[in-house]
Amino acid sequence: MSDSDLLRKTRKNTVINQISKYQEKEIKRALVNVVEKIQKEFPKIRLNFKPTSKLSFIVKHLRKLFPDIDFHYKFDSSFISPDGGFLNLEDSEGNLYPVLISEVKNQGTNDKRQKEGLCKQSKGNAIERLGKNVIGLRAYLLNEGIFPFVCFGYGCDFAEDSSILDRVITIGMFGELNKTYLVNQGLFNRGSFYFRDSKWSVEEMTEIMYDICKRSIHYYFAKYGEDIFLEK
């Protein structure tokens, strides 16, 4: 094995180990699948995984991009922590470019309570927490023409007859559910929201996440030049 092949293999294993360390859900397995597929297709790129992003990092990033606009946060300890973390493309200077940010939301126990003869409970606030994260992530990527965010939601609260789906649609800037919106449409950096009552399989999530990740890489190649992302 050549030195360059060994380096690529080591980098891939490092990213996969980072993902496995922080994730214990099916989305972790899907993310590992995505990394393996991406590394086969783009063997010379550098991938970086982070489970969280501190608000201080995002604000610093925004202040650099928009020096004439005020940005604030209160606590250095505050962070955004999507279930699938941040998968980034890394350039030769160590700068990070998000290619996939993924979440999973499970909400709704009334189907189980009904079977047990119990009364219904009010619907939970998982969607409100999701909305808060999406606001921060949209701001983080305001300078880009893509928003590589995807959320998979499942549970009886997301059945076709549930009004809570309109909350999700609102968070998605009134885009269609179960459709990928990666490239911004004018002012609308929507993101992709896949929601239904039944659980999403690892295979389904892998396919959708891989498509977002691959297209995001091509976007950064086109905008910044491919060479800065490739190992020499």
Image: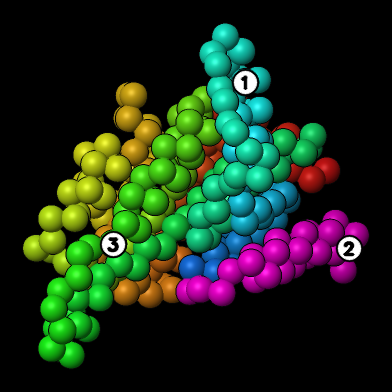
> For the view shown, which residue lies furthest in the right direction?
3
Location of mark 1 (residue):
63
Q: Earlier in the sequence, mark 1 or mark 2?
A: 2
Q: CA distance from mark 2 to mark 3?
A: 53 Å
User: Is 82 rendered above or below residue 169?
Assistant: below
Prevalent SS, magenta region: helix
Location of mark 3 (residue):
124
| Circle 1 or circle 2, nearest the eye | 1
Q: Earlier in the sequence, mark 2 or mark 3?
A: 2
Q: Amino acid at mark 1?
A: Arg
User: Is 185 rendered above or below residue 147?
Assistant: above
**Quarter the N terminus occupies:** bottom right
- How many other residues sit within 10 Å of disc 2, few (<14), some (14-19) or many (≥20)? few
**Quarter the C terminus occupies:** top right
Q: CA distance from mark 1 to mark 2?
A: 42 Å
The span shown in magenta is 1-26
Q: Nearer the viewer, residue 199 or 128?
A: 128
Q: Return the mark for residue 2.
A: 2
